Amino acid sequence: MNLQELPSAAKDIRNEIKAMIPESSSSKSSNFQEEVTQDEAGNKTYKGVVFDEKMARLQEQMGINKKCERHLVYFSKATRLDTSETEGYLIPLSDNVKIAPLSDNAKTGPGGELQGGPYINVRGGYYIHVSNKAILSSGAAILLVVSEG
């Protein structure tokens, strides 16, 4: 998993999306006017036409030319990601998003914060390529672009 800087135009689009949801917006109020679902753990998934259009532009600016699924997700608790059968790109919206491969000694402490073992702190304006099983810190609002298949 290598940290890479987003192109300038992609950073602008990321910031537009970031402002849409309270988990990553500085205003803490949502102007997301489309579909929001929440599961029993408090994780939220955001969907809609405006989001899809912004994500298509972001994907284009990142040079990802393959057909992909796009997700805008907020994880209230530490979460395992499994991209072992595909590949994806994780773009953080919230601050201090940490990700660690499950094969390492990553553990979660109180509140779901990653502790111990090597982890990567994915800062705003950057993204990371993920192609295996990993654990993501709690309180993470992310964009996830994964290849279909």
Image (tube, grey):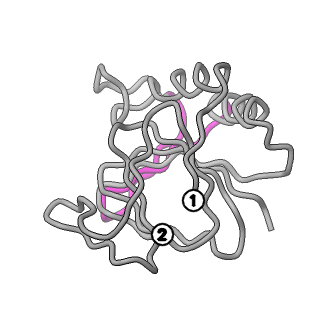
25 is higher (above) or lower (below) than 48: above
> Is residue 43 part of the magenta span, yes or no?
yes
Between residues 141 and 9, which one lies in front from this camera angle?
Answer: 9
Number of residues whose C-alpha sits closer than 10 Å to that of mark 2, classed few (under 14), some (14–19) or many (20 or more): many
Using the image, determine if residue 107 lies above or below residue 43: below
* Residue at the image point whose x is 46% and y is 80% from the top: 103
Q: Name the residue furthest left.
A: 110
Q: Is residue 94 magenta?
A: no
**Quadrant position of the N terminus in the picture:** bottom right
Which residue is the site of mark 2? 134
Q: Which residue is mark 1?
A: 1
Q: Residues within 10 Å of mark 1 (few under 14, many from 20)?
A: some
Residue 56 pos. (x, y %): 75, 34
Upstream in the sequence, badge 2 or badge 1?
1
Cα separation between marks 2 and 1: 10 Å
Q: Which residues are magenta?
A: 33-49
Q: Is residue 47 above or below residue 26?
A: below
